[in-house]
Each structure stands twice: as C-alpha cells, then as structure tokens.
Amino acid sequence: MLGYLFVANYFLLGSLGRNAVSAFNVAKFGGTSVANFEAMSRCAAIIENNPNTKLVVSSACSGVTNLLVELANGVADQARRQEVLNQLAQIHNEILDQLADPLSVEKEVHIILDSVATAAEAASYQTSTKLTDHLVACGELMSTHILAQLMRERDIDAVRFDIRDVLRTDSNFGKAEPQLDAIAQLAQDKLVPLCQQQVVVTQGFIGSDEEGNTTTLGRGGSDYSAALIAESVQAAGLEIWTDVPGIYTTDPRIAPKASPIPEISFSEASEMANFGAKILHPSTLVPALRHDIPVFVGSSKEPEKGGTWIRHQVESSPLFRALALRCNQTMVTLRSANMFHAYGFLAKVFEILAKHKISVDLITTSEISVSLTLDQTDTSGGAPELPQAAREELEELCTVEIEQNLCLVALIGNNMSESKGYAKQVFSTLEDFNLRMICYGASPHNLCFLLHESVSKSAIQKLHRELFEN
Ligand code: ADP
Ligand code: ASP
Ligand code: MG
C-alpha cells in the first residue's frame, strides 16, 4: 500500500512540471482499465485516492474499438453485422446493469448504439475515412457516459465532457493532426474552469475538425489525447493507467522475465514508443516534453505496485534500457547502376516519395541500391503500401522490390554510438537470424534490425536473455 500512497501523493506534493499552471493531474485509463464494471470501479478508486486528479481521459471499453473498426470496414453479411452490434450492446449493457441508477445514462448509450447500427449499414454499402472516424469514436463516447455515472455513484463530483468541443484537429480522418493553438484556447475557455469545480471525464482518441466532423488520432491514440489535453490545461502531471505496472525492459507478453523500469528519460521512452512499444502511443511524449509535464505509467489493476516515471533528469542512463518490436513493416529496395558515383539519384527518389506524400522511416544505402521502410500512414494497423502511381514513377528510375511480413526490433539505450565493445555481444546473439536491414548511428539511443516476422519474437527473447537477464 505504501507504494500506492507514494504514487498518489507524489503529484500532490509538488511534482509540478516547470510550466504547470493548473495544479492538477490528468489521468488516462486504457481499454482494459475500463473493460467492465469492476475495472471501472478500480479507476474510480484511483481518482478517489488522489484528489489532485481532476481530468480523466478514457478509452473505449476493451475490444470495442476493434468491433467498430470491423463495422467501419463494411460488413456486407447482415447476420455478422447484427452479431457485432449485439456484442457491442452486451459489453455496455453488462456495465449499465451493475450501476445503481442505470437509467441515468442508458438512454445516451443506447442513442449512440443506434447511431452505430445506422452508420454500420451505410459502411456496408460504401466506406469512407470520415464515416470510419464517426463510427470508431462511438466507443469512447459510450464508455465516458458510463464511467462518469459510476464515479458519481461513488460520490465523486464527476461530469462528462465531450472533448470534440476542445480537441480541434485537421480533417485527416484516421490520423488527424491536432491544432495546438486552437486546442489551448478552447481548453482554457471550456475545460479549465470546469476542472476547477468537478472531476471531468472525457474521451481519448477523438477530436473534431473545423466543420465539426469527428476525427481520430489513430489507433492507441488515447495516450496522445491525454498528453495533448494535459498540455492544453498546463497540468501538473500525466498519469497513464494501463494493464501493466509500468514500462518494462520489453513487452512482458513476449519475454516473461522482462522487468519494470522505475524511472526513464523522455528520450528513452520516446524511442520506445516510436519503435513500437505498445504501452505508449508514439506521439504521447511530445506534448509532455514540450511542457515538461512528468508522466507516470502504472497498472489500474495493481496500483500498489507503483510504476514508471518518465522525466527529464534520471539517475541512471544504462547502455541498454529496453527492446521494442514494431511489426507490419514494408521495405522498399531501389536498385540502379546509375546510382554508382552519381549525384541526384536520391534527390529524385525523395522527390517522387514526397509528391505521393510517402513518409520514410528507416533508410540504408549501398553503391547501387537504397533500402527504406515506409511509415505507417493510417489507423488500419496493416503494413503500409507503396501506391501504384509512386511505384510506376520510381520504376522509370530504377528497379523496385517490395518486401512485407517484416518486423523491426529496436535495442534502446544511451550513448550507444559512442560506446565500444558491445556490438560483438549483440551480433553474436543474433548470428542465427537473417537481418534484412540494420540501422545504427543516427541516434545515440538505438540500434535496430529488420527481420522476418516469423523470427522477430525469438530475436527479442534471445536479446533480452543475453542483455537484460544477467
Ligand atoms: P491500454 O489499453 O491501457 O492503452 P495497451 O494494450 O495499448 O494498453 O498497452 C499496454 C500493453 O503494452 C501491455 O499489456 C504490454 O503487452 C504492451 N507493451 C509493449 N511493450 C511494453 C513495455 N516495454 N512495457 C510494458 N508493456 C509493454
Ligand atoms: N480506443 C482506441 C483504440 O483502441 C484508442 C485507445 O484505446 O487508445 O485504438
Ligand atoms: Mg494503448
């Protein structure tokens, strides 16, 4: 219990970020944290235990976004569509039934369920990214009605707030870009005064564009929402409550001997998020870093276990900090003899990629070829595709080979590019693996490898055993 009290009191006792104005915290609860009545009750207990937490950002109940994505992709088979709708109703009704006063929010939740049914039918004829965002946002819109009511029933003075009134984005449906100035202004006008009076329960993941259309920040985007909201209200701290007690040396589902990291720097944690550690959406730490807001990651199921603090200054900066895995990688290899000792080839390649709005993630070059991986462009979670038009233009310059079913394994640490002697240990651990690409040197914080999907987890397990379990 001591650990939990420490966690609860830490933000209370002057852990204010440099620029903090609102002396309150923002707490984000992920899908498993609000999966059912018991889980939601644990979230409420966390809020009760820290009166300094005034703003709650919630995900959709576990599994709901996946069901909504299925509907948004268009389910032509009416029986299957109905089955998905029934599952959605069941998840929410089960929680509603356990409230003392379900009627107080049942109508609101059922109106949203009805709108899901209508939109799902429309999507079965014709899908669009705009319709998808309208549909997938419904998970958070429902969970927050229920969570706010559950808190009220525990005597927390909680009010539900529709974050679309504050979280302004562009209209890039599926991966909308937040508009920071508008968000800051709207938050100061609408959100901060409310937080001074009540606990505000609002949605992660969603926003709205200037025309009032619902947008989303991309899968797993509630972490990012919470950080944007924390920034906009100039919060004292950001708490990310999830299903593991902190950030581990690697995904504990892959390496069961992974251990929690009590304290990690913003740069290390950002690298982990960028390189696929699902625990944090890749953009989460950008707003927190901009405003120097300390971030805590802990388990809503076991808050007494403590968690990870992400801060600017940390006591230790080990050479090896963690391993991350990002799958669904697409590697494009461009080969041309004309590249040999010539200038301008890469400029032409990047001009084509830029014209087609293709963002490159990693790149390595040799004398006659260049290999690059494509950035994930939308929320589908699938491997990014090289558009046919871009491929045709590239083929006028060189041969184009595309490889998928690849994963990126990243070894994250400190001063890696300046340290000697460890490469042998890393590469001998991986000697049985076919490394499709290696990136090293540009960042002092990482060394990464592209491997076939089928062996990527065993590469992580082997590296973890060798580098972290002694
Ligand atoms: P939430 O729904 O709360 O946002 P997520 O499922 O998105 O939760 O993220 C939590 C999961 O992230 C954990 O259950 C774990 O499997 C995974 N994960 C990946 N890398 C790490 C890591 N380095 N440390 C802890 N968890 C990790
Ligand atoms: N509900 C959304 C998702 O599942 C956002 C989130 O949970 O972070 O992707
Ligand atoms: Mg998540």
Image (cartoon, helix red, strand yellow):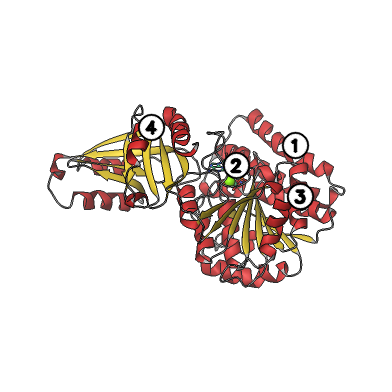
- Could you tell me how far apart the alpha carbons at marks 4 and 3 are, in whole angstroms? 49 Å
Residue 418 shown left or right of residue 24 in the figure: left
Label 2's element? helix
Q: Of marks 4 and 2, which one's residue comes earlier in the chain? A: 2
Q: Of marks 1 and 2, which one's residue comes earlier in the chain? A: 1
Is residue 458 placed above or below 98 in the rendered structure?
A: above
Residue 449 shown left or right of residue 259 in the figure: left
Q: Amino acid at mark 2?
A: Ala
Q: Of marks 2 and 3, which one's residue comes earlier in the chain? A: 2
- Could you tell me how far apart the alpha carbons at marks 1 and 3 are, in whole angstroms? 14 Å
- The residue identified by callout 1 is 90
Q: Amino acid at mark 4?
A: Thr
- The residue identified by callout 3 is 146
Residue name at image x 13 percent, y 44 percent = 340
Closer mark to the observer between disc 1 and disc 2 = 1
- Could you tell me how far apart the alpha carbons at marks 2 and 3 are, in whole angstroms? 27 Å
Q: Amino acid at mark 1?
A: Gln
- The residue identified by callout 2 is 122
Residue name at image x 57 percent, y 59 percent = 227
Q: Of marks 4 and 3, which one's residue comes earlier in the chain? A: 3
Label 1's element? helix
